Image (spheres, rainbow, N blue to C red):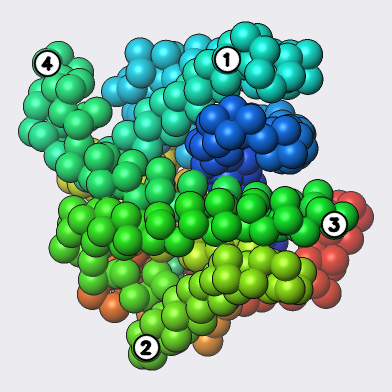
Amino acid sequence: MFDYPIFEMPFIGHRLLFAFDAILHVFISHGAAVGGSIILVLSQWLAIKNNDAKLDALSYKILFTFFILATAVGALTGIGIWIHINIINPAAIGALLRVFFWKWLIEWIVFNVEMILLLWLFLIWKKHSLGTPGKKKVYKLLVSYAVASWFTMAIITAILGFMMTPGNWLVSYFPAKPDYLASLLNPSWFPSLGFRTFWSIAWAGSMAMVLSYFFTRDDLELRKKAMRLYGAVLLGCIPFIIAFGAWYYAQFPQAAKELFWMGMVTRRFAGNPEYATYVTVILSALVLLGAITFYTKPKQAPLFLGIIMLIGSMGLIGGFERVREFVRKPYIIYDYMYANGVRVADVPYLNKTGYLKHAAFVPPEFREVTDENRLVAGKYLYQMQCRYCHTVNGINSVKARTKGMSEEAIYHRIGSLNSPATPFMPPFTGTDDERKALAAYLASLAEQTPANVYKQKLDEVSK
Ligand code: HEC
């Protein structure tokens, strides 16, 4: 059942490792590709309509920057996501691939088409100047590129939506008679797609404004035109972001709504949910301050307001992704699979027969807990059920979380991981012997000071 090798990420842990890559990817894919292409379609349309060579040249410079970002950082972090999810949670990615196989394959093909269109666009843009018939071809290519990038986001959003709200797919009978359509049309897909689409455009608008600032240093009239255009796009998106965001939130399962505030402020400040409001208001104010000043005073607005606007946008986007991941806990696929890869339906069976017994990558001598192998068996249990969110000594360290607790107290705590105090943790899965082994291992961590570990190593060498 758990037939994947164990990968442990020391110190920073899986969650942070993944978050770095995934959020960077979102900045680029949503900004430079999806939102960026839509913004460029708009400014190209205006440039062609008004025969405006300067706007055309500015659009090319923005395209050039987006092109570098999308093909270098975007594509690389995208591959990074595949590598990370496969080593972090292969059970979950396996489940998602079974449900979304054809859709994902189509997404991958369209992504390749998207990259080819972008390259092609980039290569022929300068060959066809405004007013020539070739320019129309370039414009059509740009529109196709925008459609392709939006399409890839639509599919990935369906998968993300499915992880939080699998909807009717859950009641269909998998694998014999699954309702594949229900997995795609899951309740949060459409609202979350609308939400992402509009903030991608707004985010690309803020990037385009800051880029325009640099590209129009010696032409303030052009700067004014660009700031008015991209600023209007950004501000115009706001009502849609709010409306789709509220609709999206309404689809969250009740338990996820209850985790919303903690997701925003982290558990340490869970007693002060108002901090979440403060942070959101401050970040939004930064965005608005930058956008409105650039819009109303395009020629005078200083660069630092643009930088502040980018920081505010990035804070809001990163915060949203964090909350979305957090509120889905303890699940990775809601009501179907826990964050640690254990399927909900298998828990009673594993509790009865034993968890380690089914762990193909655990050496056979540790699949049954005995007095001799207790600590090592406990370590395997930690690695297979807890390391998704904890590290031993680093961030969210399990050693710190059990500090000062006796082995007995740890044993009791393991029995109530999914209690109302910590509803984001999956329950421990396994027999009573396994639970004791995990408690023994966690209690033994307190002894593991660097000096002790060193001494142990010395003893081993001298043996
Ligand atoms: C889905 C992620 C996740 C998994 C899996 C997980 N934990 Fe946790 N655990 C957390 C988070 C988040 C906290 C709270 C950290 C904080 O207080 O900031 C936590 C806190 C704890 C605490 C302290 C509880 C308290 O009351 O303060 C203990 C003990 C603990 N975890 C043990 C475990 C053990 C043992 C496992 C494996 C069987 C495990 N956790 C699996 C996310 C997880």
Q: Kindly state the secondary structure of the residue where label 2 is placed.
A: helix
Along the line of sight, which residue is nearer the eye, 360 or 28? 28
Mark closer to the observer (1, 2): 1
Q: CA distance from mark 4 to mark 2?
A: 46 Å
Residue 451: x and y, percent? 83, 74
User: What type is the residue that disc 3 sits on?
Assistant: Arg
Residue at (72% x, 67% y) in the render: 299
Residue 342: x and y, percent? 33, 42
Residue where numbered disc 1 is placed: 136
Residue at (64% x, 51% y) in the render: 226
Q: Is residue 436 above or below residue 126?
A: below
CA neighbours of label 1 inside 10 A, class few (<14), some (14 to 19), many (20+): some
CA neighbours of label 3 inside 10 A, class few (<14), some (14 to 19), many (20+): few
Left or right side of 210 for 440: left
Residue at (34% x, 75% y) in the render: 261
Does any atom of ligand 1 lie closer than 8 Å to the CB of label 4? no
User: What type is the residue that disc 1 sits on?
Assistant: Lys
Residue at (50% x, 23% y) in the render: 143
Left or right side of 436 for 290: right
Residue where numbered disc 4 is placed: 177
Left or right side of 373 for 334: left
Q: CA distance from mark 1 to mark 4?
A: 48 Å
Residue where numbered disc 3 is placed: 217
- Quarter of the view holding residue 227: bottom right
Q: Kindly state the secondary structure of the residue where label 1 is placed.
A: helix
Residue where numbered disc 2 is placed: 274
CA neighbours of label 2 inside 10 A, class few (<14), some (14 to 19), many (20+): few
